[in-house]
Image (tube, grey):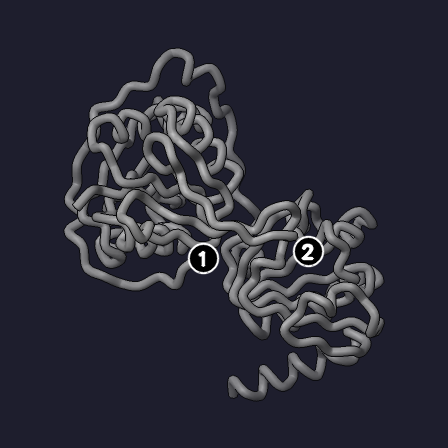
Amino acid sequence: MAEVLVLVDHVEGKVRKTTSELLTIARRLGEPSAVFVGTGFDAAKETLARFGAEKVYRVESPEVLGHLVVPQAELLAQLVSSTSPAAVLVPSSPEGKEIGARLAVKTESGLITDAVDVQAAGDGSGVTTTQSVFAGSYTVSATVTKGTPIVAVKPNSATPEESAGAAADEVVDFTPSDAAKGARITESKPKQATGRPELTEAAIVVSGGRGTGGDFSKVEDFADSLGAAVGASRAAVDAGWYPHTSQVGQTGKQVSPQLYVACGISGAIQHRAGMQTSKTIVAVNKDNEAPIFELVDFGVVGDLFTVLPQATEAITAAKD
């Protein structure tokens, strides 16, 4: 069975949920092999083994960690050459997509980004992916016809499933080229902790828009009752009501959670392009003709300042 390389997304050995999802997908295609770059492997090994990684190609070189994405693309290209994998899976994050694009050029392979599903092709010829394209107007199936399929997969595209793997440690002898070291990381600042999950990785996202009038307190209370991340529409961000890092939409972050709740958001195409691959969509809006209602699974016509506190109270009571 051919290997499937999975680039591990982690912070000092704390493996993110996106990686367990990619390992789950990798088992559909072949034998999962994780590619671990950085420190903290001892902390990560248990998680990688629990979700099915049979091998872990490991690099801890400061030359890889101290520069931007080019060394990681070179490392993956070296592994593609030596292992001839069935596919390479990377997270569909800005960094992951850049690594995937550079890897595709280096290996003369096809690249698929923002996949929301990945399956083995019925004829055994490779992989078939599902994507939402043209601002969410179409859902398409795609295959790679040249080289090694390189697929950037959106978070929450698969439910992580445990399957014991050996996670055999294989230290890779790798030295990045001089060209790969052209951009060096000089400073790294940790994100301010909010106690909420990362927006692009969260299983539940609650977003607020123009209808909040700048008061996100009810949106945040409702999100916290669900253990959800908080997002915002472009209108709310442009008005200065919420940070740009929380913007959901075509020019912000694209999310694909199990549950997306839009509060006081009209549903302009710019916003819909960033969230309509969500599995279940709920909208709260006092305008019963808002475009968002064309997209949702469940809609509530009402003032969010009345609806959300009642919902928060009900959820809190159900937990007790």
Residue 307 at x, y = what percent?
74, 79
Disc 1 versus disc 2: distance between alpha carbons? Answer: 18 Å
Residue 182 at x, y = what percent?
47, 15
| Amino acid bearing label 2 | Arg
Residue at x 72% of width, y 49% of height: 270
| Amino acid bearing label 1 | Ser
Q: Earlier in the sequence, mark 1 or mark 2?
A: 1
Residue at x 70% of width, y 83% of height: 310
Above or below — where is 235 with respect to 230? above
Residue at x 70% of width, y 68% of height: 219
**Label placed on residue 62:** none
Query: Quick one: label 2, few (<14), some, or many (20+) residues within 10 Å?
Result: many
**Label placed on residue 157:** 1
At numbered mark 1, what does the secondary structure look like: helix, strand or loop? loop
Above or below — where is 98 with respect to 206? above
Above or below — where is 214 with respect to 103? below
Above or below — where is 318 with respect to 173? below
Q: Quadrant of residue 297?
A: bottom right
Residue 292 at x, y = what percent?
74, 65
Instruction: Residue 12: tell me if it is visible.
Output: no
Q: Quadrant of residue 231?
A: bottom right
Query: Quick one: label 1, few (<14), some, or many (20+) residues within 10 Å?
Result: many
Residue 243 at x, y = what percent?
70, 49
Instruction: Residue 130: tell me if it is visible.
Output: yes
Left or right position of 59 against 194: left
Q: Residue pushed farthest front?
A: 123
Q: Which residue is mark 2?
A: 272
